[in-house]
Image: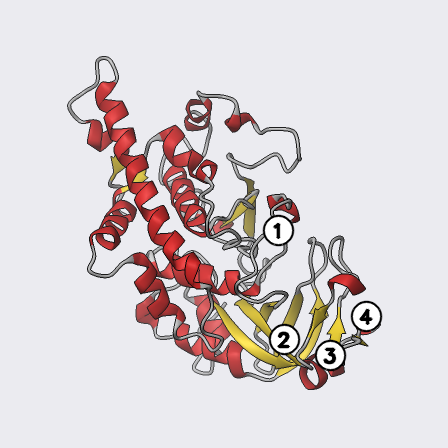
Amino acid sequence: MRSRPNLTSFERFQLLIRKQSLYSDQDGILENLLRSMGTEEIVHIEQKEGGTQLKLIMDFESNGQAMFKPMRFPREQETLPNHFYFTDFERHNAEIAAFHLDRVLGFKRAPPVTGRLLNISSEIYPLAEGQLLHTFFVSPAGNICFHGKCSYYCDTSHAICGNPDTLEGSFAAFLPPKEAAARKVWRHPWRRSYHKRRKAQWEVDGDYCDLIRSTPPYDRGRRLLDVVDMAILDFLMGNMDRHHYETFKMFGNDTFLIHLDHGRAFGRSKHDEISILAPLYQCCIVRKTTLEKLINFHNGPERLSDALKKSLAQDPLNPILWEPHFRAIDRRTNIILKTVRTCIQQRKDTPNASGESVDEVIIDDGF
């Protein structure tokens, strides 16, 4: 990709991706990109292939693209008690909140996401084609609905409906095309079994992290610390749906993990799924800068929930999260810090432990 004076905000975002992060707050392009996704005219719509639930690829007049996830539920509706993590519904507001939380924590590894209010009759239906077009209907309540084609929840009983034709949704900026910036897909080492009875190896093997530590690319560099960062982000959101992750091939193995697909986060505000933190409490390492941020939010005066609220206030669909989720984030911050303290104590209590137990847990790798 070549720089030129008339680059669009989408192109500027893609061109300025760095080895350490997807964007920089100093670039001045992030707000322009969010504004473009929230206001530009949509000129083409295509349903994304694959996946368990409906997603639409939106093309804008500037040739930029975004992934659209429609609103299905009100903010206060949570994961159904009998739903497994892999059959849970996806939430558009979870994608928005995840981007802002990732940014507030200083990771900057999640693609930019904004909320937007659409008119189904004038902005979606006229551009729909093929199988998608044939799934539009008017509900008994007089609302315009559609459901598309996918492997789960794409039928009349799980349709996306407007009010009567107004629909909320999240727009996530596309990363550069793979022809320009190829990505590598990695199986997450703490991937769940995605089976209602079977457990994954890490859930039954107490020495599992020793195996991972001896396996490339987790045996050197930043990769294992990045996995722990991702676990901390997921735990704060309650996101159990993390089976793979991606990196940019051009940066090799010494680069950040791209934080993608958070539609199943923020589902249970009262439940803290400790197993999400397995990379942290099994390996007992954490990046120093990540821990410092969490301690600063814990000590105040600004809590992590306050910083997230302030960031989310910029989104056109604010309020994004139901209030109990903010309380959950502060509660989970305390749990993470307690887990780190337990790791340090375990190192001290280990026979023949060195006097540098803290340094064995808290790693300063410069990121």
Secondary-structure class at tag 3: loop
| Residue with the mark numbered 3 | 143
Which residue bears the numbered disc 4?
Answer: 135
Kindly report the distance in space between the C-alpha atoms of the residues bearing marks 3 and 2.
25 Å
User: Residue placed farthest to the top in the image?
Assistant: 351
Label 1 or label 2, whichever comes before in sequence order? 2
The image quadrant that residue 351 belongs to is: top left
Structural crowding at the residue carrying mark 2, measured as other residues with C-alpha within 10 Å and reported as few (<14), some (14–19) or many (≥20): some
Disc on the earlier residue, 4 or 3: 4
Q: Which type of secondary structure does the marked residue at label 1 adopt?
A: loop
* Point 49% across, 75% down: residue: 317
| Cβ–Cβ under 8 Å for marks 4 and 2 | no
Q: Is residue 108 above or below residue 146?
A: above
- Along the horizontal axis of the image, is 355 left or right of 7? left
Q: Residue furthest left?
A: 355
> The residue tagged with tag 4: helix, strand or loop?
loop
Q: What's the amino acid at mark 4?
A: Thr
Q: Which residue is mark 1?
A: 80
Can you give x and y, in whole percent of width and height, for residue 322 in the image? 46, 63
Pinpoint residue 89: horizontal percent, then vertical percent: 63, 55
Residue matched to label 2 = 59
Question: Of marks 3 and 2, which one's residue comes earlier in the chain?
Answer: 2
Question: Would residue 22 be seen by someone viewing this image from the given angle?
Answer: no
Question: Distance of mark 4 from mark 3, alpha carbons?
Answer: 14 Å
Q: How far is the residue under mark 1 from the one under mark 3?
A: 25 Å
